[in-house]
Image (spheres, helix red, strand yellow):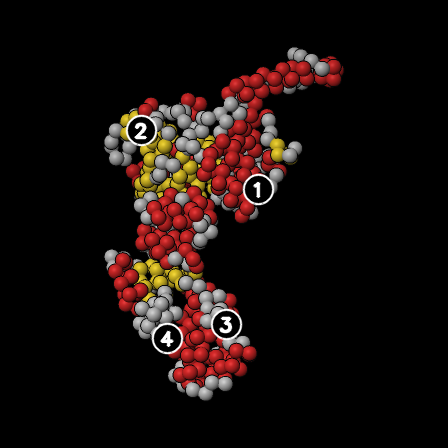
Amino acid sequence: MHVKSIKLTNFKRFKDEHLEFNDDVNIFVGDNNAGKSTILEALEVVLNYNYRGRPFNTEFTPDIFNKDAVQKFLASDKSAKHLPSLTIEAFIDGVPEYRGANNFLKVDAQGITVQVHFDATLEGVYADYLKTNPNITSIPIEFYKLEWLDFGWNPIKAVAKKFRALYIDPTRIHPTLGKNQYISAILNTALNKEELVKLTLNYRENQQVFNNSGEVKMVNTGLDTDHLITDKKLSIAASTLPAGSIQTSLQLEVDDVPFQFIGKGEQSNVQIKLAIHNKSKDIDLVMMEEPENHLSHTNLNKLVSYIERQRGTKQLFLTTHSSYVLNKLSIDKICLVQSGYKRLNKLDPAVVKTLKRLPGYDTLRVALSRNVILVEGPSDELVLKKIYHRKHGRLPEQDGIDIIVVRGVGFDTFISVGMEIGTSINVLRDNDGAYVENVVKARDAYAAYPNIKLISSENDEEFSLEPAMIYANAIDLKTLNAFAEEVLSRQTYNLYAKIADLNKRREFLIEWFRSVKGNGKGARKVDSAIKLFDGDLDFKYPAFLDEVFNFG
């Protein structure tokens, strides 16, 4: 069984959306309150008829309606014809019993609908209610009808449902409230049918032993002996469990500690692995909230690797704020919930392969940022932040500009993600002494993408940021000396000061930064950038760096 897509109408933040899914893994990413968890909640409603772990019909509130729909109703005459409807439609493969054409596409398909609408049988009652001039401030759900139907328009009974979907969210566990029902779902994944039958039989037999014990008989002998409560026999006995209720009486323990009292990280770990392993083999789909929560990097690595190896044919839906999770499970499984909805299922396979091998790269920043600047190293990032702070009195990230150091993975990987999503990306790159060859020609690859800009010095002698900065400050000896004193150690500055000529001093600095002594691409470049960032020097910088911050 696979959920192909879901249609949401007036459900919370989704007014009218049709969201398509991958058959294997779906990773929902987006800013806080973007709607990631809302999609999981909608899936839980339509697949399990539950909302936040409880029956939907008991948890249904006016707050579940889309705000725009509510406001439109409140601005109307509030007659029955203006009451909004809420629908969730799941198009599903693998459930022929649920086939029909009662869906928004009006096509023959398999699927389920949850429909929340005004109950027409209450039309007269509602009309009388309006005559009282009530102060209506929300949707009057008391007049609504909730239905759980297949696409053939047949009611669905929970006990006869043709699939099983499991929702994992450790935040739902409360020491008392709803604990049994939640843990019951977890236990079901750990037991096969034969094991459950044996446990139930043994549990009931032990209850009977308890009922026949001398202590219980003694208590019952003295219970209501005067028949003041009832003329009938009153006694205490252990409940003889109805079929299927043993799960709510058992508890899961980890190292002899009840499940609900172990650490949140271990809860997540155990739940997810049980769901994926699924000994009873009857779970078709797993939904999980932020599997990275409460887990160390080491344990997260183990968990994600387990999911990769053991998932099998189960369809997964999960939310995450972790680049590691999405890279490892495959970045092309991203479902971006950010000012709309977009899947990255057409991402370049080479990029996907790179990030699966090198999952530590923060690709999520490219996906979620409005404006991104890519740079080659941390020294570039520091210089740019200093320049921006000098001009605006704040750091670029405070204005929604995210500077990302690509390190060894290269620009192309991040650019590919930006091309697919549409993120505005300005790339500050070295020309490596050949501007036309390395920059101008490289721009041709992104000609069709106005959101991608490559920026560099046009001067081949300014082969990287450091020589470009040196040239900008070499307008006279005084300016260059001040710059050199800021970025060099005292020992190196003394060597520099022995050179009399401006041009030779400039060349000394350039050579020092790319030499072994200057540690060319390493620590000394960063040390110098830190000194610039922390210092008060009013240094000069090349004009093309202003272009880096221009996103049009």
Marks 1 and 4, how far apart at CA: 51 Å
Q: Which residue is mark 3?
A: 517
Q: Which residue is mark 2?
A: 110
Residue shown at the point (43%, 43%) measured from the top left: 329
Q: Is residue 217 left or right of residue 335?
A: right
Give percent across and percent down for residue 542: 37, 75
Q: Which residue is mark 4?
A: 542
Please, what secondary structure does the residue beneath circle 1 have? helix
Marks 1 and 2, how far apart at CA: 37 Å
Please, what secondary structure does the residue beneath circle 4 have? loop
Q: Which residue is mark 1?
A: 264
- Report the amino acid beneath label 2: Gln
Q: Are marks 1 and 2 in contact (CB under 8 Å)?
A: no
Give percent across and percent down for residue 467: 40, 74
Q: Is residue 271 visible?
A: yes
Q: Quadrant of residue 513?
A: bottom left
Marks 3 and 2, how far apart at CA: 69 Å
Q: Is residue 95 left or right of residue 288?
A: left
- Report the amino acid beneath label 1: Lys
